[in-house]
Image (tube, rainbow, N blue to C red):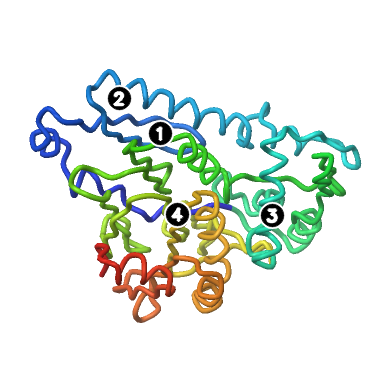
């Protein structure tokens, strides 16, 4: 499942809209729009020569996000993923070409992370009541849910683009849907276009401001209004996973919204992890997978695979304490050693 968003959308705080428009005078202005889709809030900001042009471009970007939602949302009964989830066990389903290609990528990342990333966790998510107010399933309920959890329960034939549910397993796009939507925006972006999108906490940017890269604040894992440090983005996407939001207090305990697919149990860790990648889908997938792996194994995976990632862990191991950034080599090179606005 996907993620507590701990990236603060820092543009308005660090670069006020009024200051930008006054400074830029007759040169491009910032135009902003906020919409609600994919179960979250999306804020879109771009540079445009005039407001009317900017609003037309923003409308096109919103339509792209809506098309992705129509394909992937499991809250909508008419989406492709919801149709797959309802497909009778043992009966092949013909995937549309874009979802066929995506399925192959999801399978690759599932294997590469040794199951830390697994989008087929809907059954255990429902067992823990994560779409409601949380609950503690009985051992029998959890065992039954785990028996139908996992991407391995889908037989995918890449040559024919057919997928077959082997058992009554179900998918959820929480760990990759935002990444797909933002990837499509990046791929569709015109050369030289400058925009920033915050889709429920995952950031994607294209181009730069006249003053330089887009400033983005990385928040404290427990206090999201508190900035730990800032980075300067000139492209790609930042995605964050953590347990600071959307966890439920149930019977004196916490049921976190992030699950370990390998155990079927919620993870409530004090740290967060942020991943940058030029491909927004990869950033989305790996922020979830590295959080599931934990700080030590997650950093090792990031270093072995050249991934830009940073864990924010409380210095004394207690939620709410000051945090220490633990960054991969690739993250340090990109943001702290090459002139970025790092620590």
Q: Is residue 169 above or below residue 93?
A: below
Give the residue drawn at x 26%, y 49%.
10
Image disc number at residue 267? none
Q: Is residue 96 above or below residue 114?
A: above
Image disc number at residue 239? 4
The residue pinned by badge 1 equals 190
Of pointers 4 and 2, the one earlier in the residue sequence: 2
Q: Which label sits in the foreground, 1 or 2?
A: 1
| Residue 268 position within the rendered picture, expressed as x and y whole percent measured from the top left | 51, 66
Crowdedness of circle 1 by 10 Å Cα count: few (<14), some, many (20+)?
A: few
Q: Seen in the image, is 331 located left or right of residue 290?
A: left
Q: Seen in the image, is 246 located left or right of residue 152?
A: left
Q: Is residue 206 above or below residue 328?
A: above
Q: Secondary structure at mark 4?
A: strand
Q: Which label sits in the foreground, 3 or 1?
A: 1
Of pointers 3 and 4, the one earlier in the residue sequence: 3
Residues 252 and 160: in front is 160
Work out how far the residue at label 3 is from the one at label 4, CA to CA, in angstroms: 23 Å
């Amino acid at each position: 499942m996907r993620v507590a968003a701990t990236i603060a959308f820092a543009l308005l705080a660090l670069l006020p809209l009024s200051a930008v428009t006054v400074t830029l005078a007759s040169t491009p202005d910032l135009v902003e729009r906020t919409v609600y889709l994919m179960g979250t809030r999306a804020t879109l900001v771009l540079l445009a020569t005039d407001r009317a042009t900017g609003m037309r471009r923003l409308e096109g970007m919103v339509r792209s996000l809506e098309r992705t939602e129509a394909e992937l949302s499991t809250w909508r009964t008419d989406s492709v993923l919801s149709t797959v989830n309802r497909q009778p066990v043992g009966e092949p389903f013909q995937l549309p070409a874009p979802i066929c290609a995506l399925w192959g990528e999801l399978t690759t990342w599932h294997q590469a992370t040794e199951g830390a990333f697994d989008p087929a966790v809907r059954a255990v998510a429902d067992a823990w009541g994560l779409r409601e107010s949380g609950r503690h399933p009985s051992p029998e309920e959890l065992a039954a849910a785990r028996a139908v959890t996992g991407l391995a329960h889908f037989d995918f034939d890449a040559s024919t683009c057919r997928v077959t549910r082997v058992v009554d397993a179900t998918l959820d796009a929480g760990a990759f849907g935002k990444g797909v939507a933002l990837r499509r925006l990046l791929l569709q972006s015109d050369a030289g276009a400058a925009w920033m999108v915050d889709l429920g906490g995952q950031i994607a940017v294209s181009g730069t401001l006249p003053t330089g890269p887009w400033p983005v604040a990385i928040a404290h894992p427990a206090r999201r209004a508190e900035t730990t440090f800032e980075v300067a983005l000139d492209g790609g996407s930042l995605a964050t996973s953590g347990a600071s939001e959307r966890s439920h207090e149930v019977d004196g305990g916490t049921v976190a919204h992030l699950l370990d697919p390998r155990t079927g149990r919620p993870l409530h860790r004090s740290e967060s992890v942020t991943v940058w990648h030029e491909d927004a889908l990869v950033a989305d997938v790996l922020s979830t997978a590295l959080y599931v792996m934990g700080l030590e194994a997650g950093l090792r995976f990031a270093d072995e695979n050249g991934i830009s990632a940073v864990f924010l862990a409380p210095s004394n191991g207690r939620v709410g304490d000051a945090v220490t950034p633990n960054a991969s080599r690739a993250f340090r090179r990109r943001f702290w050693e090459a002139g970025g606005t790092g620590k």
